[in-house]
Image (cartoon, rainbow, N blue to C red):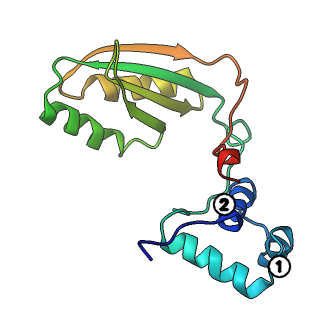
Amino acid sequence: MADYKLDNIDWKILDILQSDASISNLELAERVFLSPSPCSRRVKNLEGLGYISRRVTLIDQHKAGLPVTVFVQVSMHHQVKADLDRFAQQVLDWSEVMECYLMTGDFDYLIRVVTPDLFAYQAFLDKLTQVEGVDHIKSSFSLKPILYKTELPLTHLL
């Protein structure tokens, strides 16, 4: 399977599934002009190849009682591998961290955090400041989302 090259139907399947993972195989097959069995085999193949890493349900952040979104810039004291690894490992344990990226530029990490209120964010900040090697933290509070999507732009492949 390592040499398998995706065709337009595979990419169309991925495009449809990333916008609605709950679509039935029958409907998916109709939309990509296949019969259900070959369509199902293609989906399993795409999973096996790692193109589909998992299927999730997106929950409305506000309805879940998590209206506060904060983007946090973290600078490390030194960019020493041990400190970077320690920080990255610690972030994995914090449920309020939705995304974390190692960055180039003026800071080392960019984190997106969601919390129910400012008190909960302060508690998160207390944990963050305790991580060895953290030098500087800058928080920016989101006033409202303008665009949030999870679908990758696959139009260049279709």
Q: Determine which quarter of the picture holds residue 82.
A: top left
Above or below residue 28? Residue 72 is: above
Kind of element beneath mark 1: helix
Badge 2 density bin: few <14, some 14–19, many ≥20, Cα 10 Å: some
Where does label 2 land, which residue?
Answer: 11
* Residue 21 point in image, percent of width and height: 71, 63
Where does label 1 land, which residue?
Answer: 26
Q: In this image, 96 relative to 94: left or right? A: right
Above or below residue 149? Residue 18 is: below
Kind of element beneath mark 2: helix
Please give the name of the residue rendered at 62% of the width and 19% of the height, measured from the top-left corner: 142
Q: Nearer the viewer, residue 2 or 124?
A: 2
Above or below residue 139? Residue 114 is: below
Q: How many marks?
A: 2
Looking at the picture, which amino acid does disc 2 mark? Trp
Badge 1 density bin: few <14, some 14–19, many ≥20, Cα 10 Å: some
Disc 2 or disc 1, which is closer to the eye? Answer: 2
Q: Nearer the viewer, residue 62 or 43?
A: 43
Q: Nearer the viewer, residue 93 or 12?
A: 12
Please give the name of the residue rendered at 63% of the width and 74% of the height, measured from the top-left corner: 43
Looking at the picture, which amino acid does disc 1 mark? Leu
Tell me how far mark 2 sits from mark 1, CA to CA: 17 Å
Please give the name of the residue rendered at 61% of the width and 62% of the height, measured from the top-left corner: 55
Picture disc at residue 98: none
* Residue 1 point in image, percent of width and height: 45, 77
Q: In this image, 6 relative to 23: left or right? A: left
Above or below residue 132? Residue 45 is: below
* Residue 95 point in image, percent of width and height: 46, 43
